[in-house]
Image (spheres, helix red, strand yellow):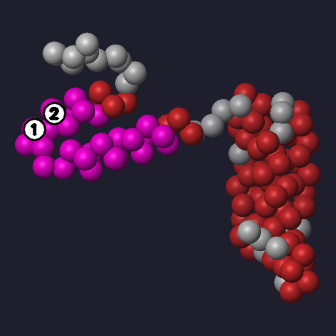
């Protein structure tokens, strides 16, 4: 866990970067597009004046995608489901290592990634 008090005493630039990071997290926790837009605009102003090169680069990218970020936060969109399915597929492919038939691997991936209730023969 970060000790912000200690960071503030020992490294002012790192402390300011941590504060900017937390303010950016607040943008994505906002409820509603208007609140997200206000927080993002405030963050962009502060980040563009930062001395940290990485934060300035991030602020330029965020400025280019500002409207999409605000819409995504307003609609509550996330790529979490896509990432979860991708991870499940990768795990299944690792489990299926050694399958002689690719069709069997594809069937296993489809079975694991769907919510179809499958009744196995001989089971109640």
Q: Which residue is mark 2?
A: 104
Can you say whether 33 is above or below 53 in the image? above
* Residue at left offset 75%, top offset 36%: 73
What label sits on residue 101 in the rendered view? 1
Give me the residue at 86% from left, 64% from top. Answer: 19
Image: 101 above or below 47: above
Q: Secondary structure at mark 1?
A: loop
Residue 22 visible from this viewpoint: yes
Is 44 displayed left or right of 68 in the figure?
right
User: Disc 1 to disc 2, how far (Cα)?
Assistant: 6 Å
Q: Is residue 73 above or below residue 118?
A: below
Q: Position of residue 77 (x, y in %)?
A: 66, 33
In the rendered image, residue 101 lying in the magenta stretch gets the answer: yes
- Residue appearing at x 82%, y 73% in the figure: 3
Secondary structure mainly formed by the magenta segment = helix
Stretch of the chain drawn in magenta: 83-109
Q: Position of residue 57 (x, y in %)?
A: 72, 65
x and y, in percent, of residue 80 in the image: 57, 39
Q: Quadrant of residue 109?
A: top left
- Compare residues 73 and 58 and report the one nearer the observer: 73
Task: Tell me: residue 114, above or below residue 1.
Answer: above
Judge whether residue 13 can be spotted in this image.
Answer: no
Instruction: Tell me the quadrant of the picture where the C terminus can be found.
Output: top left
Indicate the secondary structure of the residue bearing disc 2: helix
Instruction: Name the residue located 22 percent from the left edge and 29 percent from the top edge.
Output: 107
At label 1, counting other C-alpha atoms closer than 10 Å, the crowd grade (few under 14, some 14-19, many 20 or more) is few
Question: Can residue 105 be found in the magenta stretch?
Answer: yes
Considering the image in quadrants, where does the N terminus appear? bottom right
**Residue pushed farthest front?**
124
Tell me, yes or no, whether the two marked residues, 1 and 2, touch with CB atoms within 8 Å. Answer: yes
Q: In the image, residue 51 lies at what x, y percent?
A: 84, 76
């Amino acid at each position: 866990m970060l000790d912000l008090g200690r960071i503030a005493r020992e490294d002012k630039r790192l402390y300011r970067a941590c504060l900017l990071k937390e303010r950016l997290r607040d943008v994505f926790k906002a409820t509603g597009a208007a609140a997200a837009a206000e927080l993002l605009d405030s963050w962009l102003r502060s980040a563009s004046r930062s001395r940290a090169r990485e934060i300035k680069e991030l602020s330029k990218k965020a400025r280019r995608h500002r409207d999409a970020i605000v819409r995504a936060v307003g609609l509550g969109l996330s790529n979490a489901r896509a990432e979860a399915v991708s991870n499940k597929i990768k795990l299944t492919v690792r489990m299926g290592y050694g399958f002689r038939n690719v069709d069997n691997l594809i069937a296993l991936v489809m079975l694991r990634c769907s919510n179809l209730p499958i009744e196995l023969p001989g089971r109640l």
